[in-house]
Amino acid sequence: MKFKEGFLWGGAVAANQYEGGYLEGGKGLSCSDMLLGGSATKPRTFCPIKIEGAFYPSHEAVDGYHRVLDDIKLFAEMGWNVFRLSINWARIYPNGDDEEPNEEGLKFYDAIFDECKKYHIEPLVTLSHYEIPWNLVKNYQGFYSRKMIDFYLKYVETCFRRYKDKVKYWLTFNEINAGIMGDALASLMGLGYMTKEDLSRIEPCEFEQLHDNPQERFQALHHEFVASALAVQLGHKINPEFIIGDMCSHIVWYPHTCNPKDILAWQEKDSLFNDFCADIQINGEYPPYAWAYLRKHNIDTSYILDGDLEILKNGTVDIHTFSFYISNCVSTDPHVEKIGGNLVGGAKNPYLKASEWGWQIDPDGLLYNLNKLSSRYPHTPLMIVENGLGAVDRVEEDGSIHDYYRIDYFKQHIQAMKKAVDNGVNLIGYTSWGAIDIVSAGTGQLKKRYGFIYVDRHDNGTGDFSRSKKDSFYWYKKVCESNGENID
Ligand code: BGP
Protein backbone atom coordinates (compact mmCIF):
# COMPACT_ATOMS: atom_id res chain seq x y z
CA MET A 1 0.00 0.00 0.00
CA LYS A 2 1.08 3.54 -0.63
CA PHE A 3 1.00 6.53 1.69
CA LYS A 4 -2.33 8.24 1.07
CA GLU A 5 -2.59 11.17 -1.31
CA GLY A 6 -1.94 14.43 0.50
CA PHE A 7 0.15 12.67 3.15
CA LEU A 8 1.92 15.37 5.15
CA TRP A 9 5.72 15.31 4.82
CA GLY A 10 7.89 17.83 6.58
CA GLY A 11 9.93 18.64 9.66
CA ALA A 12 9.48 20.06 13.14
CA VAL A 13 11.09 22.57 15.46
CA ALA A 14 10.18 24.25 18.74
CA ALA A 15 10.50 28.01 19.20
CA ASN A 16 12.69 27.81 22.30
CA GLN A 17 15.15 25.51 20.54
CA TYR A 18 15.15 27.29 17.19
CA GLU A 19 14.32 31.00 17.40
CA GLY A 20 16.70 32.70 19.80
CA GLY A 21 15.96 36.44 19.89
CA TYR A 22 14.99 35.71 23.45
CA LEU A 23 14.21 39.27 24.42
CA GLU A 24 13.63 40.72 20.96
CA GLY A 25 10.32 41.98 19.63
CA GLY A 26 8.86 42.43 23.10
CA LYS A 27 9.24 38.77 24.10
CA GLY A 28 9.31 37.91 27.80
CA LEU A 29 11.39 35.20 29.47
CA SER A 30 10.16 31.64 29.17
CA CYS A 31 10.97 28.62 31.35
CA SER A 32 13.52 27.37 28.81
CA ASP A 33 15.43 30.64 29.01
CA MET A 34 16.43 29.75 32.56
CA LEU A 35 18.42 26.68 31.52
CA LEU A 36 22.12 26.20 30.92
CA GLY A 37 23.43 23.41 28.71
CA GLY A 38 24.61 19.99 29.87
CA SER A 39 25.88 16.95 28.01
CA ALA A 40 25.15 13.24 27.56
CA THR A 41 26.56 12.64 31.03
CA LYS A 42 25.95 15.96 32.79
CA PRO A 43 22.36 17.16 33.33
CA ARG A 44 21.27 20.68 32.45
CA THR A 45 21.42 23.36 35.14
CA PHE A 46 18.44 25.35 36.30
CA CYS A 47 19.69 28.90 36.54
CA PRO A 48 17.12 31.34 37.92
CA ILE A 49 19.53 34.26 37.99
CA LYS A 50 21.43 35.71 35.10
CA ILE A 51 25.09 34.75 35.33
CA GLU A 52 27.31 36.94 33.19
CA GLY A 53 29.35 34.91 30.76
CA ALA A 54 27.27 31.72 31.17
CA PHE A 55 25.96 30.14 27.96
CA TYR A 56 22.16 29.94 27.82
CA PRO A 57 21.54 27.92 24.64
CA SER A 58 17.99 29.18 23.99
CA HIS A 59 18.90 32.86 24.11
CA GLU A 60 20.23 32.84 20.57
CA ALA A 61 19.46 29.23 19.69
CA VAL A 62 20.11 28.97 15.93
CA ASP A 63 18.88 32.47 15.18
CA GLY A 64 15.64 31.36 13.57
CA TYR A 65 14.15 34.65 14.73
CA HIS A 66 16.11 36.44 12.02
CA ARG A 67 16.43 33.65 9.47
CA VAL A 68 13.14 31.78 9.44
CA LEU A 69 11.94 33.09 6.08
CA ASP A 70 15.12 31.88 4.39
CA ASP A 71 14.84 28.57 6.22
CA ILE A 72 11.30 28.10 4.91
CA LYS A 73 12.69 28.44 1.37
CA LEU A 74 15.01 25.53 2.13
CA PHE A 75 12.11 23.51 3.56
CA ALA A 76 10.14 24.19 0.38
CA GLU A 77 13.12 23.08 -1.69
CA MET A 78 12.92 19.72 0.11
CA GLY A 79 9.33 19.40 -1.08
CA TRP A 80 7.64 19.74 2.32
CA ASN A 81 3.91 20.27 2.56
CA VAL A 82 3.92 20.70 6.34
CA PHE A 83 6.11 22.58 8.82
CA ARG A 84 5.62 21.92 12.52
CA LEU A 85 6.66 24.83 14.69
CA SER A 86 5.59 26.22 18.03
CA ILE A 87 4.44 29.68 18.91
CA ASN A 88 6.50 30.98 21.78
CA TRP A 89 3.83 31.88 24.35
CA ALA A 90 6.12 34.55 25.85
CA ARG A 91 6.29 36.33 22.48
CA ILE A 92 2.53 36.77 22.51
CA TYR A 93 1.96 37.34 26.23
CA PRO A 94 5.43 38.22 27.60
CA ASN A 95 4.43 37.64 31.22
CA GLY A 96 1.60 35.24 30.54
CA ASP A 97 -0.86 37.27 32.63
CA ASP A 98 -0.72 40.48 30.56
CA GLU A 99 -3.93 42.27 29.59
CA GLU A 100 -3.05 42.75 25.94
CA PRO A 101 -1.07 40.60 23.51
CA ASN A 102 2.21 41.78 22.05
CA GLU A 103 1.50 42.88 18.48
CA GLU A 104 5.11 42.51 17.40
CA GLY A 105 5.07 38.87 18.43
CA LEU A 106 1.84 38.26 16.54
CA LYS A 107 3.30 39.87 13.42
CA PHE A 108 6.37 37.66 13.61
CA TYR A 109 4.22 34.54 13.20
CA ASP A 110 2.02 36.23 10.56
CA ALA A 111 5.12 36.56 8.41
CA ILE A 112 6.01 32.89 8.94
CA PHE A 113 2.54 31.63 8.03
CA ASP A 114 2.40 33.90 4.97
CA GLU A 115 5.72 32.56 3.78
CA CYS A 116 4.53 28.97 4.30
CA LYS A 117 1.45 29.71 2.24
CA LYS A 118 3.60 30.96 -0.61
CA TYR A 119 5.13 27.49 -0.84
CA HIS A 120 1.94 25.54 -0.13
CA ILE A 121 3.30 24.40 3.22
CA GLU A 122 0.69 23.81 5.95
CA PRO A 123 1.86 25.09 9.32
CA LEU A 124 1.27 22.64 12.17
CA VAL A 125 1.38 24.76 15.28
CA THR A 126 2.16 23.56 18.80
CA LEU A 127 0.66 26.04 21.23
CA SER A 128 2.82 25.08 24.19
CA HIS A 129 6.18 23.45 23.58
CA TYR A 130 8.34 24.01 26.68
CA GLU A 131 7.84 27.79 26.49
CA ILE A 132 5.63 28.66 29.46
CA PRO A 133 6.31 32.30 30.40
CA TRP A 134 8.72 32.40 33.33
CA ASN A 135 6.47 34.77 35.28
CA LEU A 136 3.79 32.06 35.31
CA VAL A 137 6.26 29.53 36.66
CA LYS A 138 7.70 31.85 39.25
CA ASN A 139 4.46 33.34 40.55
CA TYR A 140 1.90 30.59 39.96
CA GLN A 141 3.99 27.36 39.96
CA GLY A 142 2.84 26.91 36.38
CA PHE A 143 -0.14 24.66 35.74
CA TYR A 144 -0.33 23.69 39.40
CA SER A 145 -2.43 26.84 39.64
CA ARG A 146 -5.92 26.63 38.20
CA LYS A 147 -5.56 30.23 37.03
CA MET A 148 -3.27 28.88 34.32
CA ILE A 149 -6.28 27.49 32.48
CA ASP A 150 -7.52 31.05 31.89
CA PHE A 151 -4.10 32.42 30.97
CA TYR A 152 -3.60 29.58 28.51
CA LEU A 153 -7.05 30.00 26.97
CA LYS A 154 -6.60 33.71 26.53
CA TYR A 155 -3.32 33.08 24.72
CA VAL A 156 -4.84 30.29 22.65
CA GLU A 157 -7.88 32.37 21.71
CA THR A 158 -5.59 35.18 20.56
CA CYS A 159 -3.72 32.74 18.31
CA PHE A 160 -6.84 30.98 17.01
CA ARG A 161 -8.53 34.26 16.07
CA ARG A 162 -5.46 35.90 14.60
CA TYR A 163 -4.38 32.93 12.49
CA LYS A 164 -7.72 31.31 11.79
CA ASP A 165 -7.33 31.63 8.03
CA LYS A 166 -3.63 30.81 7.99
CA VAL A 167 -3.32 27.76 10.23
CA LYS A 168 -5.50 24.68 10.16
CA TYR A 169 -3.50 22.15 12.23
CA TRP A 170 -2.94 22.79 15.96
CA LEU A 171 -1.49 20.80 18.86
CA THR A 172 -2.46 21.86 22.38
CA PHE A 173 0.57 20.73 24.43
CA ASN A 174 3.83 19.14 23.37
CA GLU A 175 4.53 15.77 25.02
CA ILE A 176 1.89 16.32 27.69
CA ASN A 177 2.97 13.05 29.31
CA ALA A 178 6.68 13.91 29.53
CA GLY A 179 6.54 14.89 33.20
CA ILE A 180 4.37 12.00 34.32
CA MET A 181 7.27 10.08 35.87
CA GLY A 182 8.36 13.04 37.99
CA ASP A 183 11.46 14.09 36.06
CA ALA A 184 12.13 17.66 37.24
CA LEU A 185 13.29 19.00 33.87
CA ALA A 186 10.21 17.57 32.14
CA SER A 187 7.91 18.96 34.85
CA LEU A 188 9.35 22.43 34.44
CA MET A 189 9.34 22.44 30.66
CA GLY A 190 5.99 20.75 30.13
CA LEU A 191 3.91 21.81 33.12
CA GLY A 192 5.82 24.93 34.12
CA TYR A 193 5.76 23.28 37.52
CA MET A 194 8.33 23.44 40.31
CA THR A 195 7.89 23.10 44.05
CA LYS A 196 7.72 26.35 46.06
CA GLU A 197 10.91 25.37 47.83
CA ASP A 198 12.83 24.98 44.56
CA LEU A 199 11.40 28.21 43.17
CA SER A 200 12.71 30.15 46.13
CA ARG A 201 16.29 29.26 45.15
CA ILE A 202 18.53 32.00 43.90
CA GLU A 203 21.44 29.69 43.20
CA PRO A 204 21.89 27.67 40.01
CA CYS A 205 21.41 23.96 40.58
CA GLU A 206 21.27 20.70 38.71
CA PHE A 207 17.90 19.17 37.96
CA GLU A 208 18.74 16.08 39.94
CA GLN A 209 18.80 18.26 43.06
CA LEU A 210 15.24 19.52 42.51
CA HIS A 211 12.23 18.01 44.24
CA ASP A 212 9.06 16.38 43.05
CA ASN A 213 5.66 16.57 44.66
CA PRO A 214 3.37 14.06 42.87
CA GLN A 215 0.23 15.56 44.43
CA GLU A 216 0.99 18.96 42.91
CA ARG A 217 2.30 17.48 39.68
CA PHE A 218 -0.87 15.46 38.98
CA GLN A 219 -2.94 18.53 39.79
CA ALA A 220 -0.90 20.49 37.21
CA LEU A 221 -1.41 17.72 34.67
CA HIS A 222 -5.16 17.72 35.25
CA HIS A 223 -5.27 21.47 34.66
CA GLU A 224 -3.53 20.88 31.34
CA PHE A 225 -6.14 18.28 30.38
CA VAL A 226 -8.91 20.76 31.13
CA ALA A 227 -7.07 23.58 29.32
CA SER A 228 -6.53 21.35 26.30
CA ALA A 229 -10.16 20.20 26.16
CA LEU A 230 -11.41 23.79 26.44
CA ALA A 231 -8.97 24.83 23.70
CA VAL A 232 -10.33 22.11 21.41
CA GLN A 233 -13.91 23.30 21.98
CA LEU A 234 -12.95 26.94 21.47
CA GLY A 235 -10.97 26.18 18.33
CA HIS A 236 -13.84 24.31 16.73
CA LYS A 237 -16.13 27.27 17.46
CA ILE A 238 -13.72 29.78 15.94
CA ASN A 239 -13.11 27.68 12.86
CA PRO A 240 -14.89 24.34 12.44
CA GLU A 241 -12.24 23.38 9.90
CA PHE A 242 -9.49 23.36 12.53
CA ILE A 243 -7.85 19.99 13.13
CA ILE A 244 -6.65 19.92 16.71
CA GLY A 245 -4.47 17.21 18.17
CA ASP A 246 -2.85 16.11 21.38
CA MET A 247 0.84 15.27 21.43
CA CYS A 248 2.44 12.55 23.53
CA SER A 249 5.92 11.21 23.86
CA HIS A 250 5.73 7.53 23.00
CA ILE A 251 8.61 5.52 24.33
CA VAL A 252 7.97 1.90 23.50
CA TRP A 253 8.52 -0.29 26.55
CA TYR A 254 9.22 -4.00 26.45
CA PRO A 255 9.30 -6.43 29.36
CA HIS A 256 12.98 -7.27 29.87
CA THR A 257 12.21 -10.98 30.34
CA CYS A 258 9.16 -13.22 30.23
CA ASN A 259 9.12 -13.35 34.02
CA PRO A 260 5.48 -12.53 34.84
CA LYS A 261 6.75 -9.97 37.37
CA ASP A 262 8.46 -8.13 34.51
CA ILE A 263 5.30 -8.36 32.41
CA LEU A 264 3.22 -6.76 35.15
CA ALA A 265 5.82 -4.03 35.76
CA TRP A 266 5.94 -3.39 32.00
CA GLN A 267 2.17 -3.19 31.76
CA GLU A 268 1.99 -0.64 34.54
CA LYS A 269 4.75 1.53 33.07
CA ASP A 270 3.36 1.35 29.55
CA SER A 271 -0.10 2.40 30.62
CA LEU A 272 1.18 5.20 32.84
CA PHE A 273 3.63 6.62 30.35
CA ASN A 274 2.01 5.96 26.99
CA ASP A 275 -1.73 5.59 27.60
CA PHE A 276 -2.75 7.71 30.59
CA CYS A 277 -2.74 11.10 28.83
CA ALA A 278 -3.66 9.84 25.36
CA ASP A 279 -6.68 7.92 26.70
CA ILE A 280 -7.96 11.04 28.46
CA GLN A 281 -7.44 13.36 25.50
CA ILE A 282 -8.74 10.93 22.88
CA ASN A 283 -11.54 9.19 24.77
CA GLY A 284 -12.47 12.13 27.00
CA GLU A 285 -12.29 10.37 30.35
CA TYR A 286 -9.90 9.11 32.99
CA PRO A 287 -9.75 5.32 32.44
CA PRO A 288 -10.13 2.93 35.42
CA TYR A 289 -6.38 2.18 35.66
CA ALA A 290 -5.68 5.95 35.87
CA TRP A 291 -8.05 6.37 38.83
CA ALA A 292 -6.45 3.30 40.40
CA TYR A 293 -2.96 4.74 39.91
CA LEU A 294 -3.95 8.02 41.56
CA ARG A 295 -5.56 6.15 44.47
CA LYS A 296 -2.57 3.88 44.90
CA HIS A 297 -0.26 6.90 45.08
CA ASN A 298 -2.48 8.73 47.56
CA ILE A 299 -3.24 11.56 45.19
CA ASP A 300 -6.15 13.56 46.56
CA THR A 301 -8.18 14.33 43.45
CA SER A 302 -10.26 17.12 44.97
CA TYR A 303 -8.59 19.38 42.39
CA ILE A 304 -10.99 17.81 39.87
CA LEU A 305 -13.88 20.24 40.11
CA ASP A 306 -17.52 19.77 39.20
CA GLY A 307 -17.87 20.06 35.49
CA ASP A 308 -14.25 19.13 34.68
CA LEU A 309 -15.11 15.60 33.57
CA GLU A 310 -17.80 17.02 31.30
CA ILE A 311 -15.24 19.39 29.79
CA LEU A 312 -12.90 16.47 29.07
CA LYS A 313 -15.76 14.57 27.41
CA ASN A 314 -16.58 17.50 25.16
CA GLY A 315 -13.03 18.40 24.23
CA THR A 316 -11.59 15.26 22.67
CA VAL A 317 -8.93 15.72 20.01
CA ASP A 318 -9.33 15.20 16.26
CA ILE A 319 -5.97 13.52 15.72
CA HIS A 320 -3.41 11.80 17.93
CA THR A 321 0.15 12.92 17.34
CA PHE A 322 3.29 11.69 19.00
CA SER A 323 7.06 11.72 19.13
CA PHE A 324 8.93 8.48 18.71
CA TYR A 325 12.66 8.07 19.18
CA ILE A 326 13.42 5.03 21.30
CA SER A 327 12.35 1.93 23.11
CA ASN A 328 13.48 0.80 26.55
CA CYS A 329 12.90 -2.28 28.68
CA VAL A 330 11.20 -2.64 32.04
CA SER A 331 12.69 -4.98 34.60
CA THR A 332 12.05 -5.86 38.21
CA ASP A 333 15.68 -6.93 38.61
CA PRO A 334 17.49 -4.13 40.49
CA HIS A 335 20.84 -5.23 39.04
CA VAL A 336 19.85 -5.04 35.39
CA GLU A 337 22.00 -2.83 33.14
CA LYS A 338 20.38 0.58 32.67
CA ILE A 339 20.33 2.92 29.68
CA GLY A 340 19.26 6.55 29.32
CA GLY A 341 16.77 7.97 26.88
CA ASN A 342 14.40 10.75 26.03
CA LEU A 343 13.93 12.19 29.55
CA VAL A 344 13.10 8.70 30.85
CA GLY A 345 15.58 5.82 30.90
CA GLY A 346 15.05 2.10 31.38
CA ALA A 347 16.70 -1.29 31.22
CA LYS A 348 19.08 -1.93 28.33
CA ASN A 349 17.86 -4.05 25.44
CA PRO A 350 20.61 -6.47 24.29
CA TYR A 351 19.13 -6.61 20.78
CA LEU A 352 19.34 -2.91 19.99
CA LYS A 353 22.09 -0.44 19.15
CA ALA A 354 22.06 2.99 20.76
CA SER A 355 22.94 6.48 19.51
CA GLU A 356 25.94 8.38 20.84
CA TRP A 357 23.58 9.73 23.51
CA GLY A 358 22.51 6.25 24.59
CA TRP A 359 19.09 6.35 22.89
CA GLN A 360 18.19 2.86 21.67
CA ILE A 361 17.28 2.84 17.98
CA ASP A 362 14.25 0.70 17.21
CA PRO A 363 12.31 1.07 13.95
CA ASP A 364 10.37 -2.11 14.77
CA GLY A 365 9.29 -0.28 17.92
CA LEU A 366 7.72 2.37 15.72
CA LEU A 367 5.78 -0.30 13.81
CA TYR A 368 4.70 -1.88 17.10
CA ASN A 369 3.57 1.52 18.37
CA LEU A 370 1.60 2.36 15.23
CA ASN A 371 -0.11 -1.04 15.30
CA LYS A 372 -0.95 -0.62 18.97
CA LEU A 373 -2.31 2.92 18.59
CA SER A 374 -4.39 1.96 15.60
CA SER A 375 -6.17 -0.79 17.51
CA ARG A 376 -6.47 1.26 20.69
CA TYR A 377 -7.87 4.34 18.92
CA PRO A 378 -9.36 2.98 15.68
CA HIS A 379 -11.29 6.19 14.91
CA THR A 380 -8.47 8.67 15.44
CA PRO A 381 -6.00 9.47 12.66
CA LEU A 382 -2.35 9.28 13.71
CA MET A 383 0.59 11.50 12.90
CA ILE A 384 4.26 11.16 13.83
CA VAL A 385 5.37 14.69 14.64
CA GLU A 386 8.88 13.95 15.93
CA ASN A 387 11.36 11.28 14.98
CA GLY A 388 15.04 11.60 14.26
CA LEU A 389 18.62 10.88 15.19
CA GLY A 390 20.71 13.20 17.33
CA ALA A 391 24.30 12.73 16.19
CA VAL A 392 27.64 14.50 15.88
CA ASP A 393 28.18 15.63 12.27
CA ARG A 394 31.52 16.23 10.62
CA VAL A 395 31.94 19.04 8.11
CA GLU A 396 34.40 17.99 5.37
CA GLU A 397 36.96 20.39 3.98
CA ASP A 398 34.75 21.13 0.99
CA GLY A 399 31.82 21.90 3.31
CA SER A 400 29.89 18.70 2.63
CA ILE A 401 28.36 16.62 5.43
CA HIS A 402 27.96 12.91 4.79
CA ASP A 403 25.35 11.94 7.36
CA TYR A 404 24.67 8.44 6.03
CA TYR A 405 23.83 7.28 9.60
CA ARG A 406 20.92 9.73 9.70
CA ILE A 407 19.68 8.64 6.27
CA ASP A 408 19.87 5.06 7.43
CA TYR A 409 17.89 5.86 10.59
CA PHE A 410 15.14 7.62 8.65
CA LYS A 411 15.01 4.94 5.95
CA GLN A 412 14.35 2.26 8.52
CA HIS A 413 11.67 4.29 10.27
CA ILE A 414 9.89 5.19 7.04
CA GLN A 415 9.99 1.52 6.06
CA ALA A 416 8.28 0.76 9.38
CA MET A 417 5.64 3.38 8.56
CA LYS A 418 5.03 1.70 5.21
CA LYS A 419 4.48 -1.64 6.92
CA ALA A 420 2.05 0.03 9.33
CA VAL A 421 0.09 1.51 6.44
CA ASP A 422 -0.04 -2.01 4.93
CA ASN A 423 -1.55 -3.13 8.22
CA GLY A 424 -4.30 -0.57 7.77
CA VAL A 425 -2.98 2.07 10.16
CA ASN A 426 -4.54 5.47 9.45
CA LEU A 427 -1.32 7.49 9.34
CA ILE A 428 -1.72 11.00 7.94
CA GLY A 429 1.71 12.55 8.20
CA TYR A 430 5.29 12.68 9.37
CA THR A 431 7.45 15.56 10.55
CA SER A 432 11.04 14.64 11.33
CA TRP A 433 12.51 16.24 14.42
CA GLY A 434 14.87 19.19 14.21
CA ALA A 435 14.65 19.46 10.46
CA ILE A 436 17.39 22.00 10.83
CA ASP A 437 20.01 21.73 13.61
CA ILE A 438 18.65 23.24 16.83
CA VAL A 439 19.34 23.22 20.56
CA SER A 440 18.69 19.87 22.26
CA ALA A 441 15.89 20.05 24.82
CA GLY A 442 17.29 17.34 27.06
CA THR A 443 20.94 18.38 27.15
CA GLY A 444 20.92 21.93 25.78
CA GLN A 445 23.65 20.98 23.34
CA LEU A 446 24.12 22.09 19.76
CA LYS A 447 26.53 19.25 19.19
CA LYS A 448 23.57 16.86 19.25
CA ARG A 449 22.38 17.56 15.72
CA TYR A 450 19.15 16.33 14.15
CA GLY A 451 18.86 18.43 11.00
CA PHE A 452 18.91 17.93 7.26
CA ILE A 453 20.37 21.43 7.34
CA TYR A 454 23.58 22.11 9.24
CA VAL A 455 23.85 25.28 11.30
CA ASP A 456 27.24 26.74 12.15
CA ARG A 457 26.68 27.19 15.87
CA HIS A 458 28.54 25.47 18.68
CA ASP A 459 28.33 24.78 22.39
CA ASN A 460 31.01 27.34 23.22
CA GLY A 461 28.84 30.06 21.68
CA THR A 462 30.87 30.36 18.45
CA GLY A 463 29.62 30.05 14.88
CA ASP A 464 28.03 32.42 12.40
CA PHE A 465 24.65 30.63 12.13
CA SER A 466 25.17 29.99 8.41
CA ARG A 467 23.18 27.11 6.95
CA SER A 468 24.40 24.27 4.69
CA LYS A 469 22.75 21.19 3.26
CA LYS A 470 23.72 17.76 4.52
CA ASP A 471 23.52 14.64 2.32
CA SER A 472 20.26 13.84 4.13
CA PHE A 473 18.75 17.05 2.71
CA TYR A 474 18.91 15.65 -0.83
CA TRP A 475 17.73 12.25 0.32
CA TYR A 476 14.69 13.61 2.19
CA LYS A 477 13.81 15.77 -0.82
CA LYS A 478 13.41 12.55 -2.84
CA VAL A 479 11.25 11.06 -0.10
CA CYS A 480 8.92 14.06 0.11
CA GLU A 481 8.66 14.53 -3.64
CA SER A 482 7.81 10.87 -4.22
CA ASN A 483 5.28 10.70 -1.33
CA GLY A 484 7.52 8.24 0.46
CA GLU A 485 7.99 5.92 -2.52
CA ASN A 486 11.63 6.69 -3.18
CA ILE A 487 13.55 6.05 0.01
CA ASP A 488 16.73 4.43 -1.38
C1 BGP B 1 11.28 15.70 22.56
C2 BGP B 1 10.94 17.16 22.53
C3 BGP B 1 11.70 17.99 21.62
C4 BGP B 1 13.06 17.48 21.24
C5 BGP B 1 13.22 15.99 21.19
C6 BGP B 1 14.63 15.47 21.13
O1 BGP B 1 11.17 15.22 23.84
O2 BGP B 1 9.57 17.39 22.23
O3 BGP B 1 11.62 19.30 22.04
O4 BGP B 1 14.09 18.19 21.70
O5 BGP B 1 12.57 15.33 22.23
O6 BGP B 1 15.23 15.51 22.39
P1 BGP B 1 16.64 16.12 22.66
O7 BGP B 1 16.57 17.52 22.13
O8 BGP B 1 16.82 16.07 24.12
O9 BGP B 1 17.60 15.28 21.92
Image (tube, rainbow, N blue to C red):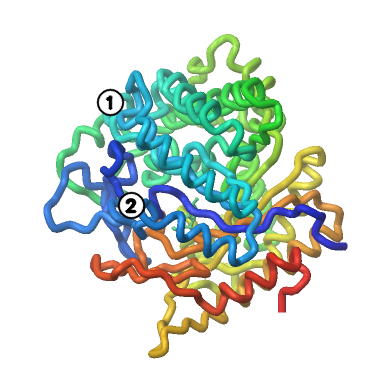
Quadrant where the image shows the C terminus: bottom right
Q: Residue at x 44, y 55 (%)?
A: 68
Q: Is residue 448 visible?
A: yes
Q: Is residue 224 left or right of residue 441?
A: right
Q: Residue furthest bottom?
A: 397
Label 1 Cα neighbours within 10 Å, binned few <14 / some 14-19 / many ≥20: few
N-term-proximal mark, 1 vs 2:
2
Mark 1 = which residue?
A: 139
**What amino acid does circle 1 point to?**
Asn
Question: What whole-number distance in Å separates the C-alpha atoms at marks 1 and 2?
Answer: 24 Å
Mark 2 = which residue?
A: 20
Secondary structure beneath dot 2 equals loop
Say if 55 sits above or below 162 in the image.
below
* Ligand 1 under 8 Å from disc 1 Cβ: no
**What amino acid does circle 2 point to?**
Gly
Q: Nearer the viewer, mark 1 or mark 2?
A: 2
Kindly indicate the quadrant of the structure image that contains residue 36: bottom left
Label 2 Cα neighbours within 10 Å, binned few <14 / some 14-19 / many ≥20: many
Q: Nearer the viewer, residue 228 or 21?
A: 21
Q: Is residue 49 left or right of residue 248?
A: left
Q: Residue at x 13, y 58 (%)?
A: 53
How far across and down, in percent of the image, does residue 255 sit?
65, 58
How far across and down, in percent of the image, does residue 283 sit?
71, 30
Q: Residue furthest left?
A: 52
Q: Residue at x 69, y 69 (%)?
A: 479
Q: Is residue 297 left or right of residue 165?
A: left
Say if 366 sits above or below 250 in the image.
below
Secondary structure beneath dot 1 equals helix
Q: Nearer the viewer, residue 39 or 300?
A: 39
